[in-house]
Amino acid sequence: MAKLSTLFDAFDAAALNTGLWNDNSVGVSQSAGNGYAAITASTDYHFMGFTPPSRDFQEDTFTWEWTFTGSAVAGVEQYCSIGNGVTGQEIHYGRFSTSLGYFVGADDGFLPWNSTDHRWCRIRTTATQMHFETSADGATWVNPFGGGAGIENLPAWDLSNVQVHFVNGYFSGSGGGEMRMQTVGVATNTLSGSLNAAPGGASAQLGGDLSSAASGALALGGPQASGAGRIVSRTSLAGVLGGVGLAAAGHFESSAEDVTVSVGPTRIAALGVGATVLSPDVAETILEREP
């Protein structure tokens, strides 16, 4: 059975991958150019997830990045559920009212919600324990709970056969707004810190991913991905004498606006035909490219 950590989705296609996410309520959508899957808030608890094929979560790691259009307010329940498909037992980790919290059987932990520090969440299992962690950049991870919380004994039920759902609901008030799943899992061939290279740049062949949670800076080249590759930068992506290049129908995404080069144009126009470009001020498909 595949490990849960092998699951990855950057939600950059024109529609939700229902082959992966095969168990969804109403209120779940994905649009080309947005770079996220949206789950609306509801007293009926809208959700996006998968049932069999299940995944193995023994001695493994599961990571996701999310944002919200509303504030953390009383009555909100926006969380990730990892459950056993046979017994129905679950682990919950997410935003509960004004707190980040988790539930593992009778054990739990809570601290005030922070949209910056808790943008990335991770559950990590060892042979005997389960760790609940957060990150502001997807690269540096901490246990935010302290005082002995954030690390619990493994539940008694079987973690070798799990299913995942992301849930957005509320039991009072008006809810916490739309829950936007930016990324679930970690891409293969990922550089988890800064993406820096000189003089040739960083490269990924045959559909590989170049992903940086921090900055991406190149001295004489530029990140290059061939085939249907992806280049993802969660902050800045800069190049000198180069830029960002993708051959064929690749994908370029930046969560910041500072996509720059020192000499020559930003190479968005030079991406392959059919390439997708996502940034705060650009969201389009390349129809033709410069010679």
Image (cartoon, rainbow, N blue to C red):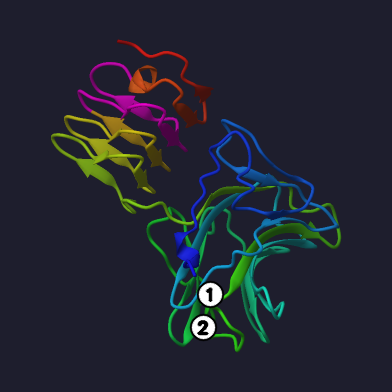
C-alpha separation, residue under disc 2 versus residue under disc 1: 7 Å
Outermost residue, top side: 291
**Label 1 near label 2: C-beta < 8 Å?**
yes
Seen in the picture, residue 76 relative to 11 is either above or below; the reply is: below
User: x%, y% of residue 161?
Assistant: 58, 75
Mark 2 Cα within 10 Å, few/some/many (few <14, many 20+)? few
Residue 103 location, quadrant: bottom right
Does residue 260 show up magenta in the picture? yes
Label 2 sits on residue: 147
Relative to 201, residue 141 above or below: below
Query: How many marks can you see?
Result: 2
Q: In the displayed structure, would residue 165 be above or below residue 240?
A: below
Q: Which residues are magenta?
A: 240-266
Residue occupying the point 34% across, 33% down: 227
In this image, 175 relative to 58: left or right?
A: right
**Residue farthest along the left direction in this orientation:** 199
Where is mark 1, residue-wise?
145
Characterize the magenta stretch by its predominant secondary structure: loop
User: Tag 2, which secondary structure?
Assistant: loop
Q: Amino acid at mark 2?
A: Gly
Q: Going by the image, does 253 lie left or right of 290?
A: right
| Nearer the observer, 222 or 59 | 59
- Image coordinates of residue 184 in percent, x first then y, are 53, 54
